[in-house]
């Protein structure tokens, strides 16, 4: 190992790519190898040099792409090749990030390292949901706790519930969504009032941020009803009351939706991250649009091609809800996961069923964001998403924002009529299929193996 070898454990921050530190950004720009995981904003990878090696190491609760020991070994191995290595971790590397174990392995191997802190999710959630985690009127302390209870049968074993139950300190649970019912029950059982305010902040600091306000008595039920998705932190304590008054970010989101502004989370002053990623030519984004037959079929053809190369493919179908079509059976035989997130024929906006279609589309987009940002796929097809935007079920800017945040190595294919200008602008390949004739016009009904 020569003096070039170095590992930087860098905190990527919670979601908004602008929240990485200046030092963390410099490390990324100089890295020769970057190991990153699921919760890192993929836009940060655009800052990495084109010659650098990017390695996705997964890390999703309970679903680690690489076991921790292998990540540790990889860090050591890359440093021993005299590389400048960045280990980019969501939030802060030393808060529930197993950064301690990675650094421990580096010490064992005699590899030099630095730790660059990041904004941890709990602090970002407090800031972006307008909840000061400490406040002179309410409490003087805050505790960060893992809500991932290994010992479900005996939840008392890994968490000191009596200590958390007494007092008025703010509690911030990470990884707690699955076990929120147990968390709330235990806090009540150990002394917190059932009426204690609770905030569940999901996707903090991103355009998908959602803040659910409840109490210890009903938070678990509300999470289910409102279908809150991870990542989310649970904030418990009287400080949650402040949300009502200080919730600046949600207002910004609503404002930007109304005005069509593209970046909601960047301050008006100097916004280097937003501009540098927006102007960069990047991404593999293809659109098949037009009124002719063959848009989805072209996309399925690409799925076939990708599977042939051993690539990982996923398909999300917007608006559609017909599971009897031939392609679904074939794709399932090929092991390509396909989800339908639609309710079928879209009625006019004034129709009473229209809001249900809108909700289904929004849920589909959230699922798409999850899969795209996971880095788990080489090709993702968003079938009929252009038509969904054209029907007003999805906002063009929201979809464009997701495309911008997609990791560069993932190919995205969008299909559907009337592709919106913002989407066309972002794509590198756009084909319009013009109908010269259609069998349907000659009275020929839809045929098995041809139209479905
Ligand atoms: N090292 C990270 C935490 C990793 S553990 C940090 O300091 O933030 C993963 C957990 O972090 C998730 O289960 C969730 O509880 C929380 N989390 C990460 N990103 C989040 C986000 N944008 N919004 C809300 N919670 C988030």
Image: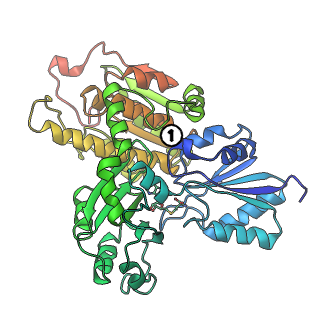
Q: Is residue 1 visible?
A: yes
The answer to whether residue 319 is above or below residue 340 is: above
Q: Nearer the viewer, residue 230 or 241?
A: 241
To which residue does mark 1 refer? Answer: 406
In this image, 268 relative to 237: left or right? right
The answer to whether residue 350 is above or below residue 373 is: above
At 66% from the left edge and 71% from the top edge, which residue is drawn?
101
Q: Nearer the viewer, residue 254 or 284?
A: 254
In this image, 447 relative to 187: left or right? left
Q: Whole-percent x and y of residue 196?
A: 28, 69
Q: In which quadrant of the rendered image does the C terminus lie?
A: top left
At 37% from the left edge and 65% from the top edge, which residue is drawn?
138
At 54% from the left edge and 30% from the top edge, which residue is drawn?
269
Residue 162 quadrant = bottom left
Q: Report crowding for label 1: few under 14, some 14 to 19, many 20 or more residues within 10 A (C-alpha).
A: many
Q: Secondary structure at mark 1?
A: loop
In this image, 192 relative to 34: left or right? left
Q: Which residue, as the protein is rendered here, is positioned at the far left?
A: 352
Q: Whole-percent x and y of residue 249?
A: 38, 42
Q: Which residue, as the protein is rendered here, is positioned at the far front?
A: 136
In this image, 337 relative to 270: left or right? left
Residue 52 quadrant = top right
Residue 6 quadrant = bottom right
The answer to whether residue 442 is above or below residue 222 is: above
Q: Nearer the viewer, residue 223 or 243?
A: 243
Q: Whole-percent x and y of residue 258?
A: 30, 28
Q: In which quadrant of the rendered image does the N terminus lie?
A: bottom right
Q: Is residue 297 visible?
A: no
Q: Whole-percent x and y of residue 198?
A: 31, 63
Q: Which residue, as the protein is rendered here, is positioned at the far right?
A: 2
């Amino acid at each position: 190992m020569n003096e070039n070898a170095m590992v930087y454990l860098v905190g990527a921050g919670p979601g908004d790519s602008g929240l990485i530190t200046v030092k963390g950004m410099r490390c990324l720009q100089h890295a020769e190898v970057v190991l990153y995981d699921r919760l890192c904003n993929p836009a940060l990878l655009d800052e990495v040099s084109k010659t650098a090696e990017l390695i996705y190491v997964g890390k999703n609760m309970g679903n680690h792409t690489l076991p921790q020991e292998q990540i540790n070994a990889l860090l050591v191995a890359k440093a021993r090749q005299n590389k400048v290595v960045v280990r980019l971790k969501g939030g802060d590397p030393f808060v529930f990030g197993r950064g301690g174990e990675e650094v421990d392995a580096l010490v064992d191997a005699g590899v030099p390292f630095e730790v660059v802190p990041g904004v941890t999710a709990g602090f970002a959630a407090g800031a972006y949901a307008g909840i000061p985690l400490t406040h002179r009127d309410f409490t003087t302390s805050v505790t960060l706790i893992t809500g991932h209870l290994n010992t479900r049968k005996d939840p008392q074993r890994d968490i000191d519930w009596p200590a958390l139950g007494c007092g008025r300190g703010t509690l911030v649970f990470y990884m707690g969504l699955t076990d929120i019912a147990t968390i709330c029950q235990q806090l009540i059982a150990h002394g917190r009032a059932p009426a204690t305010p609770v905030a569940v902040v999901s996707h903090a600091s991103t355009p998908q941020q959602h803040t659910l306000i409840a109490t210890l008595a009903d938070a678990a039920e509300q999470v289910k009803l409102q279908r809150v998705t991870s990542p989310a932190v649970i904030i418990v304590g009287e400080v949650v009351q402040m949300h009502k008054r200080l919730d600046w970010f949600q207002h910004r989101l609503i404002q930007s939706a109304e005005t069509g502004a593209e970046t909601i989370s960047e301050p008006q002053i100097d916004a280097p991250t937003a501009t540098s990623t927006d102007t960069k030519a990047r991404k593999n984004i293809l659109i098949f649009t037009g009124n002719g037959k063959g848009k989805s079929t072209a996309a399925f053809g690409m799925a076939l091609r990708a599977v042939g190369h051993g690539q990982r493919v996923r398909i999300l179908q917007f608006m559609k809800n017909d599971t009897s079509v031939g392609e679904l059976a074939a794709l399932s035989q090929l092991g390509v996961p396909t989800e339908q997130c639609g309710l079928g024929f879209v009625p006019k906006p004034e129709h009473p069923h229209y809001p249900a279609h809108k909700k289904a589309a929004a849920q589909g987009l959230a699922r798409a964001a999850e899969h795209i940002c996971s880095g788990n796929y080489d090709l993702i097809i968003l079938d009929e998403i252009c038509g969904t935007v054209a029907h007003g079920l999805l906002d063009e800017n929201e979809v464009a924002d997701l495309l911008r945040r997609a990791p560069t190595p993932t190919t995205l294919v969008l299909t559907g009529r009337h592709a919106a200008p913002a989407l066309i602008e972002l794509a590198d390949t756009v084909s319009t299929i013009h109908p010269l004739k259609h069998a349907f016009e000659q009275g020929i009904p839809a045929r098995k193996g041809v139209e479905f």
